Image (cartoon, grey):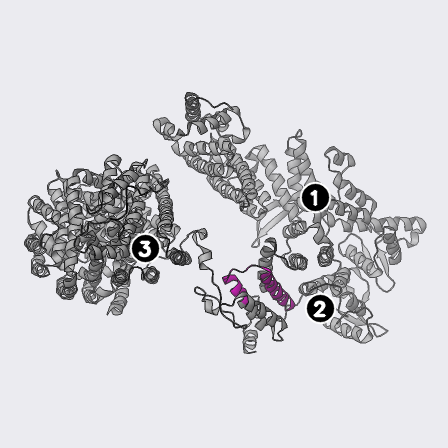
Amino acid sequence: MASIGFNMDDDEMMNQAANTQTLASVDPNAVENRYVVNANQGQTSLYVPSTTGSEAASWNMYRVENHSAESGSFSNSTYHHVQHSEPSSRTVQDGSNATSLATSSSLGGTNTQPDYGGYTSYSNSAGTYSHGSAGYQGYYSGYQQQPNPSYSQPVGAYQNTGAPYQPISSFQNTGSYAGPTSYSSTYYNPGDYQTAGGYPSSSYTHQTTTWNGSNYANYTTQQYSNYTQDSSGAYAAGNAGANSLHYQQHYKQWADYYNQTEVSCAPGTENLSVASTSTQLPQVSQVPGVSGGYPTSNSQAPTTFAPPWRPESSSSQTPLLQPGATVTGAYDSYRTHGAPSFQNQHPSPVQPHFMKPLESKSSYGNFQEQQKTACPQLPNLQYPVAQQAPQNYQPPMQTVQSLETQRVSKLQIQTNPRIASNLPLGLPKLDKEGPNNSAIAKPAYISVSLPKSSEKVLSNDAADTVLKAGVFPKSLKSYVQRALALCKDEKQSAACQEIMKEIITKATSDGTIHTRDWDAEPLFPIPNTDMTDKNNSQNSTAVSLFSKYKKSPTRRTKSRWEPLEEKSVDKLGSLNNYAAKYSSRVPLDEKDRKPIGASSEGKTDVMKKFRFPQMEQKSAGKTVQRQAKRQRLADASAADNGDASSDSDKEQNLTAYYSGAIALANTPEERKRRENRSKRFEKVQGNRAESNHFKAKNVGTGNLYARRTTALVLSKSFEDGGNRAVEDIDWDALTVRGTCQEIEKRYLRLTSAPDPSTVRPEEVLEKALLMVQNSQKNYLYKCDQLKSIRQDLTVQRIRNHLTVKVYEAHARFALEVGDLPEYNQCQSQLKILYAEGIEGCHMEFAAYNLLCVIMHSNNNRDLLSSMSRLSAEAKKDQAVQHALEVRAAVTSGNYVLFFRLYKTAPNLNSCLMDLYVEKMRYKAVSCMSRSYRPQVPVSYIAQVLGFSNGVLTNEGSDEKESDGLEDCVDWLKAHGACLVVDSNGEMQLDAKASSSTLYMPDPEDAVAHGDSSLAVNDFLTRTSS
Amino acid sequence: MAYPSMGEAHRRITDYLNKFCDAVSYQDVASLAQLFSFSSNSPSLLSLADALNFFQDANRLIKQSDKFSQFGEILAPLFRSLQSNRLGNLVEAYHAFEKFANAFIQEFRNWESAWALEALYVIAYEIRVLAERADRELSSNGKSPEKLKGAGSFLMKVFGVLAGKGPKRVGALYVTCQLFKIYFKLGTVHLCRSVIRSIETARIFDFEEFPRRDKVTYMYYTGRLEVFNENFPAREEIQYNGNLLFVLYTADHKLSYALTHCNPLREANIRMILKYLIPVKLSLGILPKTCLLEKYNLLEYNDVVQALKRGDLRLLRHALQEHEDQFLRSGVYLVLEKLELQVYQRLVKKIYFIQKQKDPSKAHQLKLEVIVKALKWLEMDMDLDEVECIMTILIYKNLVKGYFAHKSKVVVLSKQDPFPKLNGKPVNS
């Protein structure tokens, strides 16, 4: 099913891609219109285009990821497809919808600038986040399209609500929700937005599944995949800076709250597992549940709602069913707002109660936000609530898990009909997902990010975040606080937290967390963080930037952070252990949350990891890669993707996308942001390095293996076209030791990592070289063999006398047959090898090199430089001297000297001279025909121009002379010379007549492409031989 | 050295910042340029560097006031560069300087007028010099020196900034010259092509508008390029795809231009120009006076000139061998080597004159044996075939008018002007 679903998706992707484009183009105008309605100001207009663009881009991305991640859910996707077809046909409508979205976004931009700031910070801290948002937007746009037909009316209503919503969205933004602004305006949007938040986590995948069914699948292709990876990577990286201002605020205000939440969170480990599970199966089920949950919040007055909520959240134990019930009620009301169809759905959501509780909680977060809009007074409070909500959410999830699988299937079925009904279904789902996402995302944030704004307060908060659960021993807490106290600034504390997280996860996985004497534990060295100030950039961010952030980061994360995912996997593993130990309720760990992000990679993968955390690390990395590959394939169709992994590509894409926002782009702020962005990556890498370092110390075992895999992943991503610095790759770890004992081996260009069993070790290669040298077979065979030897040497990184010998041997063979390209390859390698001080026939090849320059490059500067590079010692060498004399003969046109030198050439110098003979003869004959009068005997020409020497003609025997003479006559005739026979019967060259008739005939073996060795016939005969 | 007090350091730094801001706001190029001139080793810059190293937190000072912080992106890296430079960490200094220069270019781009050109010149110069020093540091540490290359691409960017229409374009040639210096040093001369093309073909550049100093430098370098290409004659029409693109002034013209326009008091510069101009002139058949060679200490050419005058092949070969390294490095070796044919011509001419004195009626028939014998006297061991070949080449290249009769092994000279002079034209090739 899954595979089928994939295919379907791909096709749809194409369609959708087209749709999205149209939409994107439509959007700006519509947006502007809407904008006016909204009364958003000029900024919005700029804003909107950018967002729309980003959306389009993001869609593609999304899609891919979804596929990869969601194999389980795909059956749904097929289902959805049918529905999708409808939406595509209604592109126009979609466009209108999109416009509404855009407007909403624009509103958000104006209204929520503070929020944006938060957002920006977010992006800085974690590239993934921004990505997520981008993806989100894309997603969201897609979303809108679908719902639009039915929803068009609701949209208007939404927009109205939008104003209040926006504030909320800003809150969400702190999470990563930059996008939410748009949401606020339209009903849908909020849902989408939330989903964006959820992206990193499982929720996304869920959505995708459902979405795929609808139109979304198409949209999400690329970004999605990226997103998931990114998120995981980012998380793993432990984006220190991630915390947004909002967060901090929340922290402060809700410190108490937090504690509660923490308690409730205790199941954090569970949460992690839950998250993963949710990604796997529950998503579908969740969706219904979510829908149920949503309505509750909506239906009820937000204000009223909030209070009940919090209690629930605080008491994580709250029965799932209860919230579900409430939710359902609320749900109905909610839907009524949007459309009648919703109501229909409501019942179904109610059924999946188990799931609902979780979702409802998440939805709660959203609701709270909504409430906030309603009651702007309490935004901060609400926000924290939202965070809590996710936590709460997770615990229920766990309990549900078992149920979920079943439900999922059921739910999906149910959902599908809804989907058929189109809009209502899509909306509820989105909403649900949104909350989930937000919930998940938020926790991750919390864990990762240290509060930037209020550093001091933060330190405590940070400690809390690091040790979220009261479960941890007090000594550990004080240890963390001690460490944080040493940090001079937020960046350091962020990095610190990263490390601490590592330590603590480690400890938890070891089971030593309670046994260790944390008071006596030495503090780790505080990392130097030269991080840029994320906050600064964040605050100033404009919408356009924002959109850019989203895009570029996603891709980047993909390329750079793949290795990190392994870490996250590790964490997952540790979490599993953790969970096992504290099966009941363990405080949520930041670490735990991170893994959630990773879970998005794929349900199955996640599952595996959980079960065999350590075993599967490697496989996880691979799966990631595979996903990446799949994405890439999918990308190929999309215009903007390309090999998006490279930063520059991304940036180019971005610029292309945001050409509309150029005005913004060139502002100094923008520039700053760009710089920050680039710095951010430095930071991230630095962090990673640090954490790796740290790990190395702590972990010890299994490190080597990890390094190898990391290196592999790195190299892979490098090959993938990312512009990762080559230095990052640990080549030692990649070097292969061959085990093959076969002496003979055909050359085959490697297309994958070398397999040691097919690589010959050095001893065997030595034998192979001997075998080739003594072989009687033709050059092609030898060339093939030598190439395979060279390959084996390269793969094993053997650079010694043997390498030199192989290259020398190959160069000589190549010279003998005049295979200059091959010779040049060898020569350039030899140059490097000689420069490394490896002994060989240095002089001989210096002479060849010189001859080569003289004969073929015909470039005075090259000649001068290679001459000036010759040492005095080299100039005394016979071969080099010969080469120098040849050069003199050539430059002066002294053909007599040239052919004499030809006869006395040492080594293979004559082979190189061979290549010049024709030219030299022609020059000589034209010179003669001009200078001699009346005639020149051909015998003389033959003698002077080297025709007479089949071998060495010291005593030119008559036979040979005559042979040479005939050759000479043929040659002269071929070149248009006029020959006459004089009275003595001797053949003469009529100089005067010839001077005007000489020509250079086209070489017989000339071919259009200039390389006769590539001629088809020749090739066929060669291969058959 | 005595460390300044904290207050003193603070004062120096703010002093510098004030100077910078004043220079920018008053558009005072001279003092602005001074502020960037690292290599001048001016005491004020040195003491500023010390103050920076002492004070450490100069960035705070920059951020403190709006006046400074608007140039923060320029000043912060500049300070870092100064510091590292002072500490001898040249690679670091280069990096910071490049950052600074980039920021400055950004700012420069925004200035309508070209008032800051001089400061830009200083930056272009300093970045090159700093890159060279950084490369030396790198290679002494066994790392691959690549900073000069980086400086090259930076200057290419600067060239792009200047090479538009407008008042700034007069600065383009200076940057071009710095680029030439880099490319010649790196041996990546082919990179000069694109710059030259835009200078010589772009309509917006009227060459004569550029400052004389730059024109001379430019002509010197392009002249050298033409020497490489053995492009000697006075002017040549360059065709591209069959269309006349432009008239190319070649080595002789360019180097002569440089010579006539350069500052006559700068003997070192004149010598550099002559080093290339003399071989060019020699290959055109124009010999310098010995006193010129003596005046500019170019005596390595003396033997070559004498060989040409006397037809002394041995002397030429000897001179080439003696100064081989030098000639190879400067790139004139091949040019000088080609003078051999002119030496042969001179030798044959001498033989001809001697024969003419003996027997005018048969003077135009030169026996090959005679020439071989003459070469023997010069200790040139060449057999008949070889000499015959050389004679045919001389005829072929139009250094000798006449023909060679193979049967009788005689060079038959034309009765009219058997040894045509080159008169500024190169030997046929």
Q: Nearer the viewer, mark 1 or mark 2?
A: 1
Determine which of the numbered discs, if any, sits on residue B326 in the image.
1
Could you give the CA–CA distance between mark 3 and mark 2, rounded to whole angstroms? 73 Å
Q: Position of residue A763 (x, y in %)?
A: 56, 67
The chain letter under disc 3 is A
- x then y, percent, for residue B273: 67, 38
From the top left corner, tell me how far across and down residue B141 is, in percent: 54, 43
- Residue annotated with mark 3: A565
Task: Say which amino acid is labelled 3.
Answer: Glu
Direction from residue A1007 to residue A938 in the image, left or right: right
Q: Is residue A885 magenta?
A: no
Of A276 and A917, nearer the camera is A276
Secondary structure under tag 2 reads: loop
Label 2 packing within 10 angstroms: few (<14), some (14-19), many (20+): some
For numbered disc 1, what is the local secondary structure?
helix
Location of residue A927 in the rendering, given as x and y in whole percent from the top left corner: 75, 60
Question: Is-magenta flag for residue A813?
Answer: yes
Whether residue A94 can be seen here: no
Q: Which chain is home to disc 1?
A: B
Q: Secondary structure at mark 3?
A: helix
Relative height, residue B30 to residue A312 (above, below): above
| Vertical placement of residue A451 versus B390, above or below | above
Give the chain of mark 2.
A
Amino acid type at image mark 2 = Gly
Instruction: Check chain identity for marks 3 and 2: say if they share one.
Output: yes
Q: Residue shown at 31%/41% (left/top)?
A: A664
Instruction: State left or right for residue B386 relative to residue A765.
Output: right
Q: Which residues are magenta?
A: A789-818
Instruction: Give the residue displayed 54% in from the left and 76% down from the top.
Output: A1023
What's the residue at 62%, 70% (across, down)? A773
The amino acid type, in three-letter code, at marker 1 is Gln
Quadrant where the C terminus of chain B lies? bottom right
